[in-house]
Image (cartoon, helix red, strand yellow):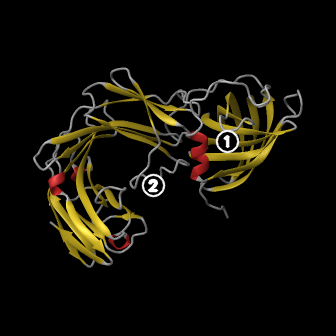
Amino acid sequence: MVKKFLIPVSLTLVLLIALTSIAHAAPPNGVDHLRGRWRGTLQNFFGANQSFTLLLGESQPDPNDSQAALYNGCISVGANGQYTPVSARVVLLGNEEYDLTLYGTANGSVIKLTGLIEARGASVKDDTVSGEWQNSEGSDNWSAIHHDRRTPKCPAVEIGNELYFYSSVNAVVNIRPDESRFEQNILDGGSNIVSSGMQVELPNGEFIVVPFYTDLFSPTADFINEFRFLEVYANLPVVGEAYTFTLLDIFGNPISGTTQTDVWYACTMDAPRNVTALLDADGLHLTWDAVTPAAGFDPTNQIGFYQIELYPDGGGGFGYGSNLISSTAHLIPFDSFGGGASGTPDGNDFGASLSELNDGFYLLDVISFSNGFNPDSTGLECQIRANAEQIYFEKFGDTITLLP
């Protein structure tokens, strides 16, 4: 029986976040015994022994450890597997032995390889490595032999089938009680390709690196099987001009084949209005007026959606949320739903139930989200909320009190 587990997030973050923007230098002992092509076998990988080819390319020193170095490169698993980027760290143990930790993507999931490299003298083909592979489905042994030390060239990534990368620029509009608008934009992306960041070229030619991000609504973005990047910026996006998105490797270099564009056009719909809440033993029953359909927004036909965000007054992250809601009513349940479940009557619920919230004061918003509505506009287009429609309540013990 396959044992399921998660690779610790902290290890991934140490490898992929803290180790970028490093000056070029030789490996720890001045001779690169590890660069080039390795061929080996993953035992019992998705139920069968799988051959693989590993290409270790550029190396740079680990700034936190004089006996360690970092590598980029790529890996191909199976007879017809495509090459996908890897990020690796090796530690010199002495006597031409190295401790290896490597992350890559294989069969649609991020894989971690750990093991001992033995580089026996000047020869290449007597260099060996063996250890354990791990992914979200299980673990087993692996081994490989070094074939040559020539600097490899990894092919461009092919998005589709097992590999995905979505990216989007979208607008954020907060309608204040006086109907004035506070406007921002979001650069957002996600992938199962091992990456250290997402670079965005703005319409004015400026480059921005978007950092890692996760929240209540992206529980699968564990930086193990999925990487997510998001940052919020002032003002609406530039209308009708391309934003260019590219994933970055462990050294902050663009990953070939991952460049995409998105064009933003407009916020076309209103925020949900006349939001009301009724409390009973089941929880908070929310209702609101249907927002008039518009370009990119018609939830009853699964174009765009409503979203609910519940958070402590004063901030501190979401306590509860529900997205992909197509109706104009929703129950925030009092009893636990296990942190993630289908919502009532629709949508997807995340986070804590009312009974699980800490005592305190809370706000909740009902938000409308539209999709891109032109061929060159991908992902989300706009999100709009109205401050005057917020619901305010107090939680104390098992008592919920709605406040004006």
Residue under pointer 1: 102
Percent of width and height locating residue 129: 80, 41
- Give the distance between the C-alpha atoms of the residues marked 2 and 1, in whole angstroms: 24 Å
Q: Residue at 51% across / 28% down in the picture?
A: 257
x%, y% of residue 300? 22, 53
Residue 312 in view: yes
Query: Looking at the picture, which amino acid does disc 1 mark?
Result: Leu
Quarter of the picture holding the C terminus: bottom left
Please state which of residues 373 and 94 is positioned toward the viewer in this rendering. 94
Q: Quadrant of the N terminus?
A: bottom right
Left or right: residue 399 versus residue 53 is left
Three-letter amino acid code at the position of disc 2:
Pro
Q: Residue furthest left?
A: 178
Residue 183, quarter of the rendered image: top left
> Which residue does the image show at 57% across and 39% down from the upper left?
18
Identify the residue position indicated by label 2 in the image: 219
The secondary structure type at the circle numbered 2 is: loop
The furthest residue to the top: 205
Q: Please provide percent x and percent y for residue 64.
A: 66, 38
Image point (60%, 34%), residue name = 85
Q: Nearer the viewer, residue 10 or 242?
A: 10
Q: Say which quarter of the image contains residue 203.
A: top left
Measuring from the top left, give residue 235's x and y in whole percent.
Answer: 25, 34
10 Å crowding of disc 2: few (<14), some (14-19), many (20+):
few
Assess whether mark 1 and mark 2 are in contact (beta carbons under 8 angstroms).
Answer: no
Element class at badge 1: strand
